[in-house]
Image (cartoon, coloured by chain):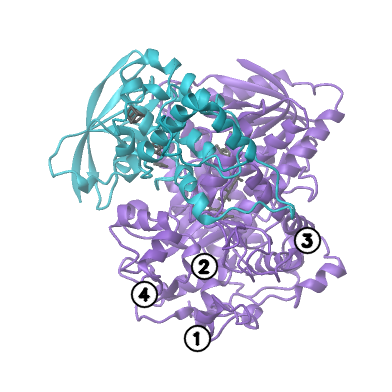
Amino acid sequence: MRRHEYDVVVIGAGGAGLRAAIEASAMGVRTALVCKSLLGKAHTVMAEGGIAAALGNVWKEDNWKVHFRDTMRGGKLLNHWRMAQIHAQEAPARVLELEEWGALFDRTKDGLILQRDFGGHRYARLAHVGDRTGLEMIKTLQHHAVHRGIDVFMETTMFRLLAEDGRVSGAIGYERQTGRPILLHAKAVILATGGIGKAWTVTSNSWEYTGDGLAMALEAGADLLNMEMTQFHPTGMVWPLSVRGLLVTEGVRGDGGTLKNAEGERFMFRYIPEFFRAETADTEEEADAWYEDKTKRRTPDLLPRDEVARAINAEIKAGRGSPHGGVFLDIATRRSADYIRRRLPSMYHQFMQLAGVDITREPMEIAPTCHYLMGGVKVDPDSQQSTVAGLFAAGEVAAGLHGANRLGGNSLSDLLVFGRRAGLYAAEYAKRLARMPALDEERVRRAERDLAAPLDRHEGEDPYAVQSELQRTMQSLVGIIRTGSELEEAITKIDALAERASRTATRGGRAYNPSWHTALDVRSQLTCAASVARSALTREESRGGHTREDFPKADAAWGKRLVVTRGGDGRMEISIEARPEIPAELQALLGEERPAGAPAAAAGGS
Amino acid sequence: MGSVTMRIFRGDATGGELVPYTVETDPGMVVLDVVHRVQATRQPDLAVRWNCKAGKCGSCGAEVNGRPRLMCMTRMDTFAPGEEITVTPLKTFPVIRDLVTDVSFNYEVAKTIPAFRPKAPEADGTRRMYQQDVDRVQEFHKCIECFLCQDVCHVIRDHEENKKAFAGPRYFVRIAALEMHPLDTNDRIELARLKHGLGFCNITKCCTEVCPEGIHITDNAIIPLKERAVTRMYDPIAWALRRVRGEPAGTPPDPDRPAT
Ligand SMILES: Cc1cc2nc3c(=O)[nH]c(=O)nc-3n(C[C@H](O)[C@H](O)[C@H](O)COP(=O)(O)OP(=O)(O)OC[C@H]3O[C@@H](n4cnc5c(N)ncnc54)[C@H](O)[C@@H]3O)c2cc1C
Ligand code: SF4
Ligand code: SF4
Ligand code: FES
């Protein structure tokens, strides 16, 4: 087996991992960067709409305090206040740093970075490049990282963390191209592996989102928080089937698009929750004027994602959906063809090429799609260290910043702000450690055996079949609207699938064998799915990305509780801990403390 | 629901063959969907790269009936009913397995391109740039590194030995993006000529034709780079003065100069 020694190993090369590796190497420690795909192909590349940062280039009134407030309110106050504060304060510097490294954002008339409107943000705040912001970000980071002496292991999947006495000592995995195992012995490990969306059928996420980082962290003894908080993005494509779930950026609504049902009604006006009523327009005139005049109140089309997704869901259930089971998203009648093609070139392209729909002439058909995980590894808000010494986490895999619901654009900024911090503190941690941590050779051998097990079995379960059954289970039983009995049924099914997954057999050899990869990935998926379903059953209220039909209201007591998952592989335990108190001076920025329940579902009568 | 027969390359560095697979199809399917269906129902270890399935990541390049394409953006209904469809790996790069090739050549070339080096910020700390000045560089930044242009370029497609001396169209796009960046102060023109083999390109435009992002690789990147290289050879002093005075690197060559 190949063995390497590093101070800091970063697992994951999206925005968070790249930014972390850049920072660690700048601190002068030996740094490795590992990713499942080729470099530059992580989820970050798909991000469309933009990066949220209170630069104040378009609206001078904007500042970190408003961004902090929007993030906390959007997250239904379940966020870690300190992460929300750091994020709002540091995001502008991180965006300007990208420019320093060669990124070219769209410009304002006087030559500054242009910012666009997005859901839940009071001011136009998203720095962007048309609708391909993620590409600009990942390429800028990638090109910057190339010259910094970071060792990159592409198409290498990490399988298990090595940790002893609550202290991390490295990770073991395999090279996809050859199938050979590889051991990275390290003082500190940073998880930047992203989310879990591939556990659902209708999803905007790729094959990589199997939650490996979360499963590895659990097994190594780290705590996960609020795994029930999954985000369904309101606008995914619905037709043709082949592209079901593919994301339609919120930028469409940010740039003037509006939601309509089969009767042509702009239905969002019927779904304005109490919590956001004071700041949301209640007439079409005011909503349309808001784009140009920020003294007007915001259009309800741009309420936070959880509200919009539930509203769309309710309209479809009430029989007011579009022919292919979605609702309409119309920008064609609202903006000129020129404007649409300039502002939303990849959406134009995506619909034209994949669905044969010209979005400058016809409305799009859309429905909610599984998109993002707000929950994740519990971290210290300043250093990003998990509850295991030397194990850090940043980006989508970490919990805290987004609370119960993430605002659009707040992920890309999260990656930069907390990726950098994870790199910095992991490097400092590694420097303080005088010696390399010891390796438990018995654990290494066991990991090697477990890795090869699906290859060694010639008869058993088909990994693709187990995976697609898991996806169907999560889609039908742990979707946007949940209920106790269905969650219990899901847990039973997931446990049965986990048993089947321990008996998967694959055909073919070690070299680039996707059936083997799937057999290993599906085990992480099942661990994460179990954590999501159990956490969802535990939280007996509706808040943000988590809606319980049997507990349709937000509950003030639950608003101060976090759901904790501990222990991997059959030893999973769920418990509850208190959300950190928000200091009074920050509380004062938030306005009213109590979010309303899930009136969207209630109003729609579903 | 219909069905389709697709012949897919199966094999590795030592060789392989086209294997016909017949699977059911749904409306709106793309080539990548068919490959996935073969994987799920017939050939579980069939190797293929993909991520976004939306033409954004550039992972799924292959040759469909001999033409370099993104499998996720090639709709099945673009083929006539009954038309023979073959899917083979990118020819310019060594096969690892089935449709997956070793594209590490590209990542090695990337390391040899001198980094972005910005000039100092303005007095008020900002870096003002105007949309009309960034437009043309933004075109180059649309590159998703699918390497289809690298695959089609005859300089390396049929001549493995040229890889040592030729960066390929993708990297001419990258060099042009840096050279025309309003803030950059580094110089890569000499290197492009001497090390990256700019002169090998004889402007066949095949790269432009296959680029899924519609980047005008030859007209907007390669030809301006060639012009700059020529200007530089004939008038190095004027060029150096321009850099010292801080005029934009993208100043077009003076039409009065004999060199152009
Ligand atoms: C279509 C789409 C559009 C979006 N648009 C926006 C937007 O406009 N604005 C915004 O803020 N957010 C947006 N998001 C969300 C945002 O893009 C993601 O949340 C974010 O990019 C995640 O970044 P990350 O660095 O945490 O992980 P990723 O970029 O997903 O990277 C994860 C990395 O971990 C690696 N990895 C995973 N498991 C392993 C393992 N076992 N071993 C080794 N490596 C592993 C992967 O290979 C990959 O390199 C969008 C998301 C999608 C899907
Ligand atoms: S134009 Fe030049 S770079 Fe492009 S394919 Fe032809 S020879 Fe290659
Ligand atoms: S220039 Fe075009 S064809 Fe070449 S790698 Fe980039 S996107 Fe692909
Ligand atoms: S899978 Fe991303 S471009 Fe085809």
Q: Where is residue A33 in the image (x, y as percent from the top left)?
A: 63, 30
Q: How far apart are marks 1 and 4 (CA)?
A: 16 Å
Does mark 1 have its CB less than 8 Å from ligand 1?
A: no
Q: How crowded is mark 2: few (under 14 residues within 10 Å), some or many (20 or more)?
A: many
* Callout 2: chain: A
Q: Mark 2 points at which residue?
A: A254
Q: Residue A145 vs residue A467: left or right?
A: right
Q: Mark 3 points at which residue?
A: A81
Which element carries disc 4, helix, strand or loop?
A: loop
Q: Quadrant of the N terminus of chain A?
A: top right
Give the quarter of the image for residue A538: bottom right
* Callout 3: chain: A
Q: Name the residue under label 4.
A: A333
Disc 2 with disc 3 on a shared chain: yes
Give the quarter of the image for residue A602: bottom right
Q: How far apart are marks 3 and 4 (CA)?
A: 41 Å
The amino acid type of the residue labelled 3 equals: Trp
Does mark 4 have its CB less than 8 Å from ligand 1?
A: no
The amino acid type of the residue labelled 4 equals: Thr
Q: Which residue is drawn at 58% across and 26% down?
A: A153
Q: Colour of chain A?
A: purple
Q: How far apart are marks 3 and 1 (CA)?
A: 36 Å
Q: Residue at x 64, y 71 (%)?
A: A122
* Callout 1: chain: A
